[in-house]
Image: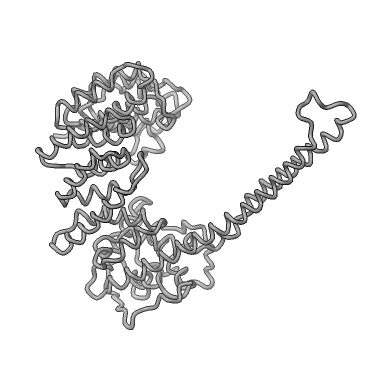
Amino acid sequence: MLSYLTFPSRMPHCNEMTNSRADHPLEHWLLLLVAPSEQDRHRAGKALEMACWGHDISGSDNNAANDDTNALPGESPPALDFEQRPRQFAADVRSVLSHPSFDAPSYVERLVAYLLSLQSDWRRRIDEQNAATELRDARFERLADKLQRGLPAGPHQVSEQLADGALAGLARLARLSAAYIGSAFRDNAPLEGAELMSPAGIMAQQVFEVLSLELIETDELLPLCLADSGLRSHALRAIERLAPTMADADMLEKLASLGALLLGELDRTTTRNHFDAAVALGAIARRDPTLVTALSQRLTHRRPAIRAAAASALRHAAPLGAEVRRDLCQRLLQLLDEPDTWHAGAEALACIGAADASVRARFIELSQPGDEGLMWQRGYALSLLGHFRDHAAECLPALIEAMESFKEFDPDECYAGPLGRVAQALEQLGPAAAEAAEPLARHLEDEPDELPRAILDALAAIGPGASAALPALEQLRSRCQDYEDDVEIDDRWDDPIGWTIQQIRRPEPP
């Protein structure tokens, strides 16, 4: 499948590189990850998994007898935890890529070629599975329809003479249904052995997530990745990473070309609720004022999808100059008059216009009790009050009142316990929301069977200013479980109530 991937005539080995051992430097495993041999790629994937996470996350067979990955690339300090290891791994990979003797452009081209091949192979396997599923579904529907035609329409039509036959027919239909469901679970043959899900495929994607400027040095690479459905999200995140680092004129020109490419995609979008390149386009717009102007012009486009997509991109272009911000706020306010553009317009307006008193007043007005049919609008306005951290005092009355009167309409906002939406906005406001601590504490036990995670996070973010909530927190903790008296700061997940208490008791910053 990957026979066209070959090593260049000379690839340097840098035993002095960061995070390396004399026998297996990190560079060795990175190069092996794009080797022509699938066995070599598999070995490299397993070794890099161990370096990145400290264990084999893919669940693949270790096959230790025929493998040399016990010689891991580097000695990770014991203090590194599961969250720190990937960050250290990324730093080590960056160190290798930036080393003068490492041919980074050639390596990145081969890595992208490898990933494109993996995505193509995965789509082929999905097509095969879909084709097999369609055949199985058609056969089941044909047999089930035949069995159903032989059954009575309802219990009132089943006479004693037909009862035995009807029950036999139902039994045959039940067996057919069970066989169909069982085959659906077993019918994954086309996906088995897909290299995209192997250690090599997983780690190739992980290494790609580290890349930034290397991707833009060759003009064709990022457009190729953007055009591939499997690599597109990775490529968009790469643009988000590299846009702030661009400095010289040549790189900024390439960045502008990517901006023009994504702007063309925006002009063709038909999805009103989500433009997947909005964050990347906004990151480029922060470096390119002409792109901000182009997006601003599209806020008045005749098609709602384009207006919404432009607003989403501009949301991520902040901060902007005062004059540009005032003009954008006027245009974005008009988007709040249309249901199709309300969400995108409101989010962009809250991000861009936080310093504008009239914008804040509009959101505070929207967050007040009103028409039950517009509860969704009130809910989103309450969420967006969290953006106004420098003006928390204006927002707190509306958020505190909402604890009593707002009825949540979105189940996704209920996963973190009571007051999910309001508590998350207060968490964003942080220490400035101290006035809300006692009202929050009154709702800690609104749902006795649920951990009030959102309220706990909000109180922890408020910190020492939430001391009024301590009696209720200590009472809740004493009833939930017997904990040790001394709570360590890293016990957030094992003892979230105790951890919250500790955050409130910590000394005030000087």
Q: Position of residue 263 (x, y in %)?
A: 26, 51
Vertical order, 31 against 479 (above or below):
below
Q: Residue furthest left?
A: 323
Residue placed most toward the observer, 373 or 174: 373
Residue 97 picture quarter: bottom left
Vertical order, 370 against 389 (above or below):
above
- Work out whether residue 213 can be spotted: yes
Residue 188 picture quarter: bottom right
Q: Residue furthest right?
A: 161
Query: Viewed as shown, does residue 286 lie left or right of 413?
Result: left
Q: Residue furthest front?
A: 302
Vertical order, 397 against 120 (above or below):
above
Q: Residue at x 32, y 27 (%)?
A: 423
Q: Residue at x 78, y 36 (%)?
A: 170
Q: Which quadrant of the rendered structure holds the C terminus?
A: top left
Residue 89 picture quarter: bottom left
Q: Position of residue 506 (x, y in %)?
A: 24, 33
Residue placed most toward the observer, 180 or 90: 180
Residue placed most toward the observer, 502 or 233: 233
Residue placed most toward the observer, 423 or 144: 144
Query: Viewed as shown, does residue 307 lie left or right of 115?
Result: left
Q: Position of residue 228 (x, y in %)?
A: 39, 59
- Work out whether residue 501 can be spotted: no
